[in-house]
Image (cartoon, rainbow, N blue to C red):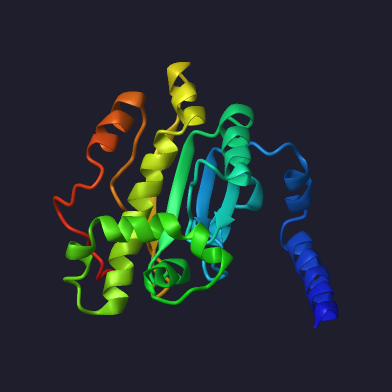
Amino acid sequence: MIGDLLKRNAHWAATKARVDPEYFRRLSEQQTPEYLWIGCSDARVPANEVVSLDPGELFVHRNVANLAPPQDANFLSVLQFAVEVLKVKHVIVCGHYGCGGVRAALSSKRLGLIDHWLSPIRCLYEEDAEHFDRIVDFDARVNAVCEQNVLAQVRAVANNPFVQDAWARGQQLSVHGWIYSIKDGLIRDMETSVASRKEAARLRALTGARSNGPRGGNA
């Protein structure tokens, strides 16, 4: 089975070169992406494909449940490199409906190490459990938490020192929250873009607000 992957790679490379002889030459040049994608590790959400960009056009960081934890050195290294070295103009936090990580966080089962990783999502749910528990259908409840998790990670990124320092020195940078539906392949804009320290402070002040309530049923 592993050998089959190598054969598939050879076929893919030959096809790419035949369709676009300059494809690999362009990729071999210094990458200058304008976007950092923070997404879920779910194999059904291939970052470049869902926004129809070549690999060199999108700098990608993926983990279970698209988290942006300030304690994770891997995430912080990616964020710092993207902001300070690549000078990306947009950071996109993209979750997806039906996320297995969110589903696991809402379950009562112990899963081991992943329980520690997912604890921010569990805390997010518990902070507004009364609201979420009104959503009787469990799948819809998971989707509502998926949406709120995206908003929470946008707040985390917007208030990260690397992003805050970039704004302080006048660097053009925006943070966006999106959510993807595997059922139809479409991305929904969560309408929570942040482009300055002032906007980040305003978003931070609104933490926990549920003025419109989670949409949850858009999966």
| Residue 173 image point, x, y percent | 45, 30
Q: Quadrant of the C terminus?
A: bottom left
Compare residues 165 and 58 and report the one nearer the observer.
165
Q: Quadrant of the N terminus?
A: bottom right
Q: Which residue is depicted at the point 50% across and 41% down?
A: 70
Residue 188 shows in the view: no
Q: Which residue is depicted at the point 48% across and 47% down?
A: 68
| Residue 143 location, quadrant | bottom left
Q: Which residue is depicted at the point 35% across and 62% down?
A: 146
| Residue 26 image point, x, y percent | 73, 44
Residue 11 shows in the view: yes
Up/down of 218 relative to 209, above or below = below
| Residue 77 location, quadrant | top right
Compare residues 96 and 114 and report the one nearer the observer.
114
Residue 181 located left or right of residue 48? left
Residue 75 located left or right of residue 6? left
| Residue 216 location, quadrant | bottom left
| Residue 107 image point, x, y percent | 39, 74
Q: Residue furthest top?
A: 169
Compare residues 184 and 25 and report the one nearer the observer.
184
| Residue 100 image point, x, y percent | 46, 72
Up/down of 11 relative to 83, above or below = below
Q: Residue furthest bottom?
A: 1
